[in-house]
Image: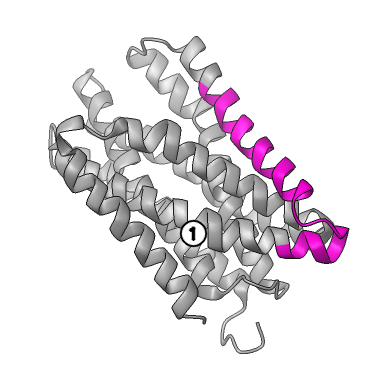
Amino acid sequence: MDSLAVHPFILLLIASLFTYLATALGAAVVFFFKSIHKRPLDIMLSISAGLMTAATVWSLILPATTLADELWHNNWLVPTIGFLLGGLFIMVSSTIIDKKFPNANIKKRSMLIIGVMPLHNIPEGLAVGVSFSALTMGVSGCSLSSAIMVALGIGIQNFPDGTTVSIPLYRDGMSKTKSFLISQSSGIMEFFAAIFGYFITLAANNILPIALAFAAGSMITVVISELIPDITPENRTICTLGFIIGFVTMMTLDLAITI
């Protein structure tokens, strides 16, 4: 941290603002298009899936195991519990969404975005906040590049998220402005979750290993349950390449570049 010209919390605010703006920009597509081709959205999702998968390993799991060994003298149990809790959180949230809104019409979809979808965004925000908190505390294996890549992977994913919400709302008869406002609102919770994650792990640094693993479990579950299934089968080849590019990019930045 000493070599950083800007305090990690300021960088966190910038990174969190980026993830929110990515959602808002995706939602703003509704002002220009009545529909959008699925192929470019699928490619963005696949790249984001690759980035997020690699981030779970090098930016979250490995630092979690190192820190757990230092604090708890156990490098596998605490991260394992955290990872399972993160994955279960996303799975339970998704189950609640599916049961409460099995065939979302315009009213139900609006309720979903405003009331339930923040459950999906909270772990992603926490992942960003925890990454920068670990950077502040100088945790071994946590670098500025890895924290940035966590935010980048989530931000890339947020763009198609915003688009795939605002355009259906507009098609269902809602105005473009209201469709945009509802769609971008899901990103606001992510911004505040990042700040919360940052300070809660600073205040109680003993929970940082489990928090890092929780974020990893959340992210990998989002990739498996939401990003990959959303990819259209006919785009599978190009999206496989996109995943590889995203994964290798994150891996290279984390292993070869330490800033």
Question: In the displayed structure, would residue 241 be above or below residue 84?
Answer: below
Q: Which element carries disc 1, helix, strand or loop?
A: helix
**Residue 4 can be seen in this image:** yes
Q: Is residue 128 left or right of residue 228?
A: right
**Residue 137 location, x and y as percent?**
73, 72
**Residue displayed at 38% across by 58% down:** 247
**Residue 3 location, x and y as percent?**
61, 89
Residue farthest to the right, as pictured = 72
Q: Amino acid at mark 1?
A: Val
Q: Is residue 22 left or right of residue 120?
A: left
- State which quadrant residue 101 falls in: top left
Question: In the displayed structure, would residue 179 be above or below residue 21?
Answer: above
Q: Is residue 157 magenta?
A: no
Q: Nearer the viewer, residue 178 or 4?
A: 4
**Residue 46 location, x and y as percent?**
30, 47
Q: Nearer the viewer, residue 157 or 19?
A: 157
**Residue 140 location, x and y as percent?**
68, 73
**Residue displayed at 50% across by 43% down:** 220
Circle 1 Cα neighbour tier, 10 Å, few/some/many (<14 / 14–19 / ≥20): many
Q: Write the start and end of the magenta stretch as one range.
A: 66-94
**Residue displayed at 67% across by 65% down:** 133
**Residue 192 can be seen in this image:** no
Q: Main secondary structure of the magenta part?
A: helix
- State which quadrant residue 41 falls in: top left
**Residue displayed at 70% across by 50% down:** 211
Read off the residue under disc 1.
150
Q: Is residue 117 left or right of residue 60?
A: left
